[in-house]
Image (cartoon, helix red, strand yellow):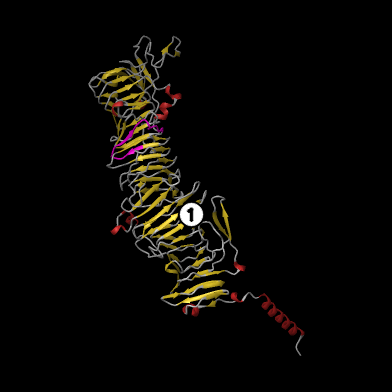
Amino acid sequence: MRSQTHRTAAAVGALAAVAALVTAPPSFAAGPRDVTADVLANRDVTLTGDTVVTVPSGQTTYNGVFRGEGTLTVRGTGTLILTKDSDFTLPKSRQRQKVSILGGNHPYVTTTNPDPPAVTVERGATLQYGNGGTTGLIGHFPYGTPAFRLNQANIRVDGTLRLSLKSAYNLGTISGSGLISQPRFLWGTWDLSGAHPFSGVIDNGTQVNAGRPEFATSLPNVRKILNQGTYTVDTPLGQTVTMGMDFYQREYGSDINVQSRPGSKVVLTGQYSWSNQGGDTDPSLSDPALNWTPARKNVNKRGTNIKGANVQWGDGTTSKIFMPGTAETVYINLLAARSRSLLTFDYNGPVTLGAPIGGGLFHDTLAAPGAGDVVIAGTRGNDVTFAAKQYYDGSTTVEKGAVLRLGSGQGDGSLWMDGDLCRVVNDGTLVVQNASTPISLSRVSGSGAFVQSGAATTTLAGSGVTYTGTTTVRKGTLALKSGATLGRSKAIRLTSPGARLDVGTSGLRVTTTLTGKGTVRGAVTNDGVVAGGLTVTGGYTQRAKGRLVLQAKPLKVTGGSVRLAGEVDLSAAGRSSAREITLLDNAGRGATKGAFSGLREGTKVKLADTVYRISYRAGDGNDVALTATAASPSASPSPGSASNSAAVGTRSASTADDSGLGWWPYVLSLGLLGGLLIPATRRTRGGRRRGGGRHAAHR
């Protein structure tokens, strides 16, 4: 006799079996249906659930169609070629994605919560849509989307999907990590719409629309794109589209076209490089230097056409320039369509643009000037070098904190200044470092600094030179022409003996500071501060507001007249024990005229413990120098002593250097100017002193 426990357990088991039967999923979920035999026999297949095809090695051409409800998985080691369009859907229970049409009069499509894949290509297998004609696509198109047909049959590609179609098509949402390949010269157009989690490689052989006015495209996980045709990026109104992958090119004639709608932007953060290894699945370049060297039959020449778009290279987190190469290996066209183009460089380290930006057609980039503007973004570390002659009619803006360099060891650079819209707005730093090619710049404004640092001459021309930052000449010659002045530059520095500032026949009027070790070619009028150590080849005129600051070497004037007024700062000589200190070396033939304020010929000047007399007829007869007197430097002047004497304070003042600080902020400080020349004071009978003017003589 069986126990009650055994009877109860049997009942529970029976109930569980019944429950399993009641709640079991439909038959298509129990396991995939294998339709390999039907496919090999070219029979049409009606899906009633999950379905699998195992493709034998080699190529299998299927002239039938798939229809019904379910999924299709392609596995095996061969290639399945579809020659006819197939139309099937997921079962309604699995459909979840929402498609919205936004934008009102400017409609664009968005997809949220996409359906799981209706088609899966497993690793090792290849599925080919079409055989070079216009049919062979798997798709279902129920949405009525504007200007393109959105595919509901999403696809996962872990193997290879080959798109051998001449028609326009859409694949829905793509996932997986395999290869999607489009053969060359088919002239079919793939509308790659929406956001895709696909993390594999795309081989574009003809034409891909990665965005249009009717949809945006997002490919955040794509590893690489092998671009052997035309890859077009576009946007709906007011949208930002970012392409973060690297692009590669293997054959001559490929390009990336970028377009955008008003209020939109396209951000490209990768690099468009040549590929000489890795095949379709992992394109790469064995040596980055090969991007800069022409290959046989120009197979490494690639380009980009910016068509009335707002484009940004980099996102401030990389220093890998988007288009590496020269005019022989890349081309860049900045064009106008609905509006002028804008190209922004946004990097966090040094990058070099070795090719010109022009406005021609495709490879003939210099057939016309570019129609757009260029911005060097103010991202920390953004240091961009133009190592080629640029050819665009537009503004060049260097934002605060950024650096734009013209010229490098890889080539000399320049900006085209002949167009009506050409100008430079420099709020950062503009450096010209050409080795052999002289250039001319006009219409340079902004609050930034200008640096001449190359052996070749740079000319600033015209009244449009109005920038207010520091002007530094480190090497070579900076020339002023056609009315250009440096009157608004807050400081002028010639930091090496070989530095030249050619001011032309108009001369240079200094209203701020002029310092350094180099040579000014032309006359100088000092209404600000000039430091010794410079050489002036023209005349030197110092007016009542001017100051001459003694440095380790005197100011040398080799031609023209010398006329003096204003102040002299002798702080640097405060600790000198020299018996003679030359303030100004007049190498010309004319006499030095005038005198520093309160320091007429023969006036005594006390520096530390030494008393000097100033002379404007020293040296070869027209130099300005201090000569120590024979009297004891410690002797106290008595009432009735010579009246033309002055005591000078010995405050410290360092020489100018490349830091841009040096002595001049100290000189310009109004609170300290009163001590430039401290006059000897009058003694009263009670021994107390009272002021007698800045350079008053002892009485």
Which residue in the protein does label 1 denote? 212
Q: Is residue 350 above or below residue 177?
A: above
> Which amino acid type is shown beneath numbered disc 1?
Arg
Tell me the SS state at disc 1: loop
Q: Which percent across, then down, holds residue 233?
A: 45, 54
| Quadrant, the N terminus | bottom right
Magenta span of residues: 451-468
| Secondary structure mostly taken by the magenta-highlighted segment of the chain | loop
Quarter of image, res 448: top left
Give me the residue at 26% from left, 27% from top. 537
> In which quadrant of the rendered view does residue 15 lie?
bottom right
Q: Is residue 20 above or below residue 368?
A: below
Would you say residue 182 sits in the magenta stretch? Answer: no
Q: Quadrant of residue 78?
A: bottom left
Residue depicted at 30% across the width and 40% down the height:
454
Q: Is residue 414 visible?
A: yes
Give percent across and percent down for residue 327: 32, 50
Figure check: 147 above or below 34? above
Question: Can residue 627 be seen by looking at this rendering?
Answer: no
**Quadrant of the image containing the C terminus:** top left
Q: Is residue 258 left or right of residue 462?
A: right
- 149 sits to left or right of 588: right
Mark 1 crowdedness (10 Å alpha carbons): few <14, some 14-19, many ≥20: many
Residue 466 highlighted magenta (yes or no): yes
For residue 339, above or below residue 95: above
Q: Residue furthest bottom?
A: 1
Of 559 and 505, nearer the camera is: 505
Total residue callouts = 1
Query: Residue 510: where, in percent of width, then height?
Result: 36, 26
Residue 40 versus residue 272: which sits nearer the camera?
40
The x and y percentages for residue 300 are 33, 57
Residue displayed at 27% across by 42% down: 436
